[in-house]
Image: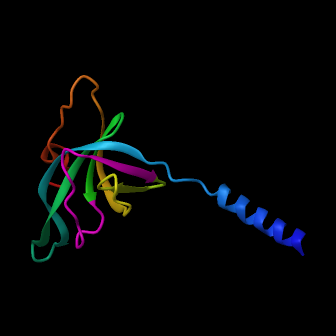
């Protein structure tokens, strides 16, 4: 009986060790711009329903990410100028607003550009956004 219990404990411990830990990267939020995002276009009436959304520029190690919140109804304002942590899993981008905050928020990557190591030259979202 004790042998079965020890084997079961060993099996559970090995399963817990086998799970991969999520690898987070750190980056700095350089800027935020409020842009008009088209939600629905009606070609018959030549009208569109639009909403204002925030686009952030996140400076990673080698890449500048242009991000928008995935859920437009429940957006949060991120701390511009502060360091945040993020992870990329398959085709999803998750961001944690602060070092102590454990809640992840999903974002869409609108554009990516290689980071110039000499200086933080950031294009505005109006130049990068192909929808306007």
Which residue range is magenta in the image? Answer: 69-88
Q: Nearer the viewer, residue 111 or 120?
A: 120
**Looking at the picture, does residue 118 appear above or below residue 4?**
above
Farthest residue, direction top: 118
Which colour scheme appears in the figure?
rainbow
Q: Position of residue 84 (x, y in %)?
A: 31, 49
Q: Main secondary structure of the magenta part?
A: loop
Is 116 colored magenta in this rendering? no
For the N terminus, the quadrant is bottom right
Is 83 colored magenta in this rendering? yes
Count numbered badges in the picture. 0
Residue at 24 percent of width and 22 percent of height: 118
Q: Position of residue 126 (x, y in %)?
A: 13, 47
For the C terminus, the quadrant is bottom left
Q: Nearer the viewer, residue 44 or 13?
A: 13
Q: Position of residue 28 (x, y in %)?
A: 27, 42
**Looking at the picture, does residue 60 appear above or below residue 8?**
above
State which quadrant residue 50 falls in. bottom left
Q: Nearer the viewer, residue 99 or 36?
A: 99
The answer to whether 11 appears left or right of 29 in the picture is right
Q: Position of residue 127 (x, y in %)?
A: 14, 43
Residue at 32 percent of width and 58 percent of height: 107
Residue at 29 percent of width and 25 percent of height: 117
Q: Nearer the viewer, residue 88 or 2?
A: 2
């Amino acid at each position: 009986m004790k042998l079965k219990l020890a084997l079961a404990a060993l099996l559970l411990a090995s399963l817990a060790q086998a799970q991969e830990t999520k690898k987070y990267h750190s980056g700095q939020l350089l800027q935020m711009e409020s842009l008009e995002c088209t939600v629905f276009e009606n070609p018959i009436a030549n009208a569109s329903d639009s909403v204002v959304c925030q686009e952030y520029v996140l400076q990673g190690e080698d890449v500048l990410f242009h991000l928008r919140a995935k859920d437009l109804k429940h957006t949060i304002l991120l701390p511009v100028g502060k360091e945040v942590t993020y992870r990329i899993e398959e085709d999803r981008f998750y961001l944690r607003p602060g070092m102590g905050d454990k809640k992840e928020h999903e974002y869409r990557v609108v554009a990516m550009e290689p980071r110039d190591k000499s200086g933080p030259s950031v294009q505005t979202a109006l130049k990068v956004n192909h929808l306007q």
